[in-house]
Amino acid sequence: MKKILFASALISCVMGASAQNIIERPSFGDNWQIGIDAGLTTPLRGHSFFGNMRPTVGLHIGNQLTPIFGIGLESAFGINTSTQNNGVKSKTAFDNSYFGAYGTLNLTNAFLGFSCEPRPFTVDALLGIGWGHDFVAHTSDDPNHVAVKAGLNFNFAICDNFGISLKPSVQWNIIGEEDPHMAMTINRASFNLAAGFNFNLGKSFTCYTCPDNTGEIAALNDRVNTLRADVDGANAALAAANAKNAELTAALAAANAKPAKVVKENTLSSVRYVFFKIGSSVITPDQAPNVEMIAAYLKNHPKAKVQIRGYASPDGSIEVNERLAAARAESVKNSLIKKYRIAADRIDAKGEGIGTMFAEESWNRVSICTLED
């Protein structure tokens, strides 16, 4: 129950900074009440209302579980009178007794709400059930019965720990030894009016005042909204990046699927190729005419220059192919200088490593000579 009350207070704090709610202090001794009852009882029907009226005394102890619901135990004793049983007194000091349990519903708090300030007056509805016993003088049997009780408690607070209650109620004998059939009629009912003198033990309910945190809540809401916007922006950027990545991946796959193409250097009229055998940088006789054509062009065009780039096929290691590509470019350069007397400053020779210009790998064992005006 304490958890329920505390949760109610927490919900109220969230709903409004100025809201107040109650909490129950975590002590077993809180909200207990003991008291003495004194009053009158008389049958409702079948007997003289005032002729059979007799005083009653009793005790009660209860606990207010929540501001609305309470439980308790009580006893009541009808004091012996000479008018009971046609003038024959009971064989004890009491005509009857009652021991029962009851529950209460605080109508004031239920309909008006709990007040932080103690109320001077409250009303409880009471419903109970218990064991009744009649002490009869002219018979050897003292009948027992099951009794049901309903009534109201009008509570007046005198001070923090003491109060007085006016308790009108009706009690029904619903099952007895003389008549075992269950019935709840006026013929089996009695009217009771008692005054209770109550002493309150322990602390009662207290208010929990929620701090004014509306500004903090608003700031947190703004922060949450900002973070949500950042997350949405990041998600949008991620989606765009994923789409771009998918596009590039598709383009790469399409490029990889295309066959290799020969790289064209300028035009056929300005480019000559000198091919080599595998693992060799020696110009073979069948390739000598290509070198001679380059030399003839340079002689016919004194201002022209030649760019020679040597390549190797993927056979062998990378280091060997890089040296072989450079040697093939130097082989053509040296032939132009030594055999055809072409000035060295008109020749730019360099190895480019492994070539991938031609789909046929053996064609990449080449020196590509590009003539420039």
Image (cartoon, rainbow, N blue to C red):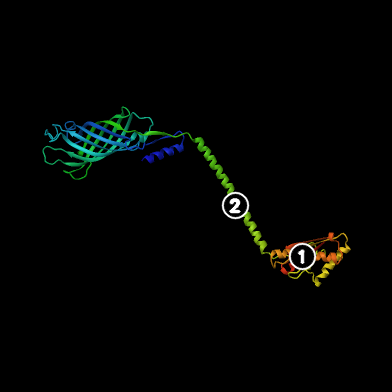
The spot of residue 34 in percent (x, y) is 27, 33
Is 315 on the left-hand or right-hand side of 348? left
Q: Residue furthest bottom?
A: 286
**In the image, is residue 285 above or below residue 136?**
below
Is 232 on the left-hand or right-hand side of 59? right
The spot of residue 9 in percent (x, y) is 41, 37
Q: Quadrant of the N terminus?
A: top left
**In the image, is residue 267 above or below residue 186?**
below
Residue 322 visible, this angle: yes
Closer to the eye: label 1 or 2:
1
Quarter of the view holding residue 51: top left
Is 156 on the left-hand or right-hand side of 221? left
**In the image, is residue 178 above or below residue 351?**
above
Front-most of 309 and 59?
A: 309
Residue positioned 58% across, 49% down in the render: 235
The spot of residue 252 in percent (x, y) is 66, 60
**In the image, is residue 330 above or below residue 69?**
below
Residue indicated by mark 2: 239
Q: Residue furthest top?
A: 158
Secondary structure of the residue carrying tag 2 is helix
Residue indicated by mark 1: 327
The answer to whether the residues at label 1 and label 2 have Cβ atoms under 8 Å apart is no
Q: Quadrant of the C terminus?
A: bottom right
Residue 271 visible, this angle: no
Quarter of the view holding residue 127: top left
Front-most of 337 and 256?
A: 337
The spot of residue 305 in percent (x, y) is 84, 60
Is 233 on the left-hand or right-hand side of 21? right
